[in-house]
Amino acid sequence: MGKSKHRPKISKHQVFSSAGTAKYIGKAIEGEAELKLIQYNPNGLLITENPDIEQIARQREPGFNHWIDLEGIHYTKLVERTAAAFDLHPLLIEDVLNTTQKAKLEYYEKSDLLFACLKVPRRNAQTQAIDTEQVSLVLMRDMAISFQELDNTDVFSPILERMNRENSKTKKARIDYLFYSFFDTITDYYYPILTEIEEALDLLEEEILHEARPGHQEKLFYLKREIIYLKKSLFPLKEIIGQLIRDDHHFFSDESKNYLRDVLDHVTENLDSVDTFRDDIDSLTTNYHSQLSNKMNSVMKTLTVFTAIFMPLTFIVGIYGMNFDHMPELRHPNGYFYTLGGMASLAVVLWIYFKWKRYI
């Protein structure tokens, strides 16, 4: 039996290791990590590649919000350097490096920071299956840190594009607005995939209603598996955003919470779409099996009609095939033709009767 791509996975925790051990658990990735510092305020934006992490931790540029973005957590040395510079908890770093970790939200009171671990959906270019990339976020008073699992996807490039525009709202707002933007961007990645699934369902519905074929069942199963996988990613995201809105802490202003409510509406909308798609798939599956059953019934009815037509003919042939010595019809000069004519007439009468009854 094959292993399901989207079957829930047991978190690959390091058995018998100390809690807080910094070890990467995830896809095998080649290449080095990328680190950049984004400093911004209402007047401008400054991006620094490979900044001095220790220097930033000791002294930050006054009047700026700071965002450190690390792409490629497989390069654990850089992750550990960042953690040491900002005194991040070892358990936090363990969660960052474990890409099988479930989505979560935690508050570290001693360090006075928020930590969120989220999943970003993506379509695998090779297998075309839905996959996820882990993104971990840290929010401090005047700084945000993002840890991206992969080094070539740049999940938050839409945010940087908006920040490069004039009159960017992100540059004018506090650091909590940037943290909201992270959630908003991650939520937006679900829309293209849900649109693809919707189009695939519409096409499949037309094909099944026209003529159900054996390959349709496999497609329905595949789509249902993808929908369940998306729901398992969306539901924790909804819970995390709801917790951010409900919790009373200094990280988010009332204005930013209003924006988070908007993101929550989008996530709820996506979850509603997922539930609708699942109902559609169940309906199409029922329709598919119903069509196959009707086809089978039609075939069986046709075979039954032909059996009913040939049964009396077989009976007649059986009588004249018994080879008794005294069968007067056998010696009649036209007996053969009378018998064939009678059998043909009987077959025609039965055919007309079944057509009249609409059995065929």
Image (spheres, grey):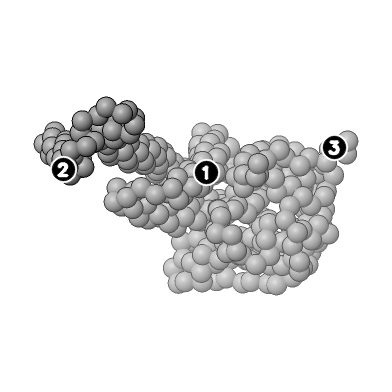
- Estimate the spatial distance between the alpha carbons at disc 2 and disc 3, rounded to whole Å: 94 Å
Question: Regarding mark 3 in the picture, which secondary structure is present there?
Answer: loop
Q: Which residue is drawn at 20% across and 33% down?
A: 329
Which amino acid does the dot numbered 1 rest on?
A: Arg
Left or right: residue 247 versus residue 359 is: right
Q: Residue at x 78, y 40 (%)?
A: 13
Which amino acid does the dot numbered 2 rest on?
A: Asn
Left or right: residue 177 versus residue 109 is: left
- Estimate the spatial distance between the alpha carbons at disc 2 and disc 1, rounded to whole Å: 71 Å
Front: mark 2 or 1: 2
Q: Which of 212 and 181 is in front in this view?
A: 212
Q: Mark 3 points at which residue?
A: 15
Picture quarter with the C terminus? top left
State if disc 1 and disc 3 touch (CB < 8 Å). Answer: no
Question: Regarding mark 2 in the picture, which secondary structure is present there?
Answer: loop
- Image quadrant in which you'd find residue 288: top left
Instruction: Give me the disc on residue 225.
Output: 1
Instruction: Give me the disc on residue 334.
Output: 2
- Estimate the spatial distance between the alpha carbons at disc 3 and disc 1, rounded to whole Å: 30 Å
Q: Where is residue 211 in the image (x, y as percent from the top left)?
A: 32, 50
Left or right: residue 320 versus residue 37 is: left
Question: Regarding mark 1 in the picture, which secondary structure is present there?
Answer: helix
Ranked by sequence position, the earlier of labels 2 and 1 is 1
Left or right: residue 356 versus residue 153 is: left
Ranked by sequence position, the earlier of labels 2 and 3 is 3
- Image quadrant in which you'd find residue 327: top left
Q: Position of residue 147 (x, y in %)?
A: 68, 56
Q: Where is residue 272 in the image (x, y as percent from the top left)?
A: 39, 40
Q: Which of 247 and 315 is in front in this view?
A: 315
Q: Position of residue 95 (x, y in %)?
A: 73, 44
